[in-house]
Image (cartoon, grey):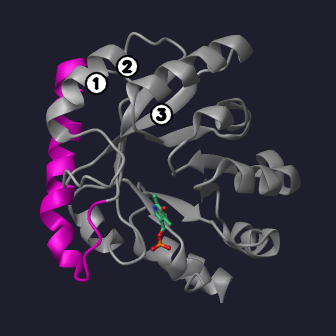
Amino acid sequence: MIKENFIKIRSEIPANVELVVVTKTRTVAQIEEAISAGATIIGENYVKEADEKYACLGKKVQWHLIGHLQKNKIKDAVRIFDMMESLDSLDLAAAINKECRKVQKIMPVLIEINCAAEWQKAGILPEDFNAFMQEALKLKTIKPMGVMTMGPLLKNPEDLRPYFEKTRQIFEKAKKIFALDDWKFLSMGMSDSYKVAIEEGANMVRIGSAIFGKRD
Ligand SMILES: *Cc1c(COP(=O)(O)O)cnc(C)c1O
């Protein structure tokens, strides 16, 4: 079913929307099946788990980090990932920048927005976003390319619409203020919410369970 699910979702979403296949808890065999159906971007939450799969799958897909990065995992993360979607603090930005400088790699990053200002969630608060960007842009070996958000955990995806809209406004405003050539990704929407997210302007969605089935 993995193959069919991937093909169906890929055909339903617009061609300009990047589909990040979220593979936390999934096996290499399951991921291979998604790849054979056309998956090109894999999203992983944990560095150690990603590394085990990366050892098998390597560079035939792109690797996106979508979970909070711990400081002691930065070296491995910089080695594995092609993009970090979950940049959530200046501290971390500086540490990633330092490691990238060491290995001479420029890391594309998305800034994670805590769009509902939830105390338990990682991410930059909307009101702190501009100040965050001003500092982050001083770091020359990371490359901010857009924003990512999770949004609050709500039963009805329709209720996420205002949060997606708010995130898009931050994304669009930043495009004007900072005028970056490579500012282009708005990553929002998961299995339950990607349709609403795309309607609200997402051009990158992160989908796991709608492809692989429920996680245990
Ligand atoms: C797990 C996860 C997803 C995918 O969730 P599904 O509901 O399985 O599609 C997307 N984004 C992030 C940040 C995640 O942690």
- The overriding secondary structure of the stretch rendered in magenta is helix
Q: Is label 2 in a helix, a strand or a loop? A: helix
Residue at which label 2 appears? 136
**Residue 133 picture location, percent across and down:** 29, 23
Q: Are marks 1 and 2 in contact (CB under 8 Å)?
A: yes
Q: Is label 3 in a helix, a strand or a loop? A: strand
Q: Is mark 3 within 8 Å of ligand 1?
A: no
Q: CA distance from mark 1 to mark 2?
A: 6 Å
Name the side, left or right, on which 98 lies relative to 85. right
Q: Is mark 1 within 8 Å of ligand 1?
A: no
Q: Earlier in the sequence, mark 3 or mark 2?
A: 3
* Residue 176 among magenta residues: yes
**Residue 108 picture location, percent across and down:** 52, 31
**The N terminus sits in image quarter:** bottom right
Residue type (three-letter) at the residue carrying disc 3: Val
Question: Which mark, residue 153?
Answer: none
106 to 47, vertically: above or below: above
Range drawn in magenta = 151-179
Name the side, left or right, on which 161 lies relative to 1. left
Q: Are marks 3 and 2 in contact (CB under 8 Å)?
A: yes
* Residue 167 among magenta residues: yes
Nearer to the camera, 31 or 116: 116
CA neighbours of label 3 inside 10 A, class few (<14), some (14 to 19), many (20+): many
Q: Nearer the viewer, mark 1 or mark 3?
A: 1
Residue name at image x 67 percent, y 81 percent: 3
Nearer to the camera, 116 or 110: 116
Residue type (three-letter) at the residue carrying disc 1: Phe
Residue type (three-letter) at the residue carrying disc 2: Ala
Residue at which label 3 appears? 109
Residue name at image x 55 percent, y 41 percent: 69
Residue name at image x 77 percent, y 72 percent: 27
Residue at which label 1 appears? 132
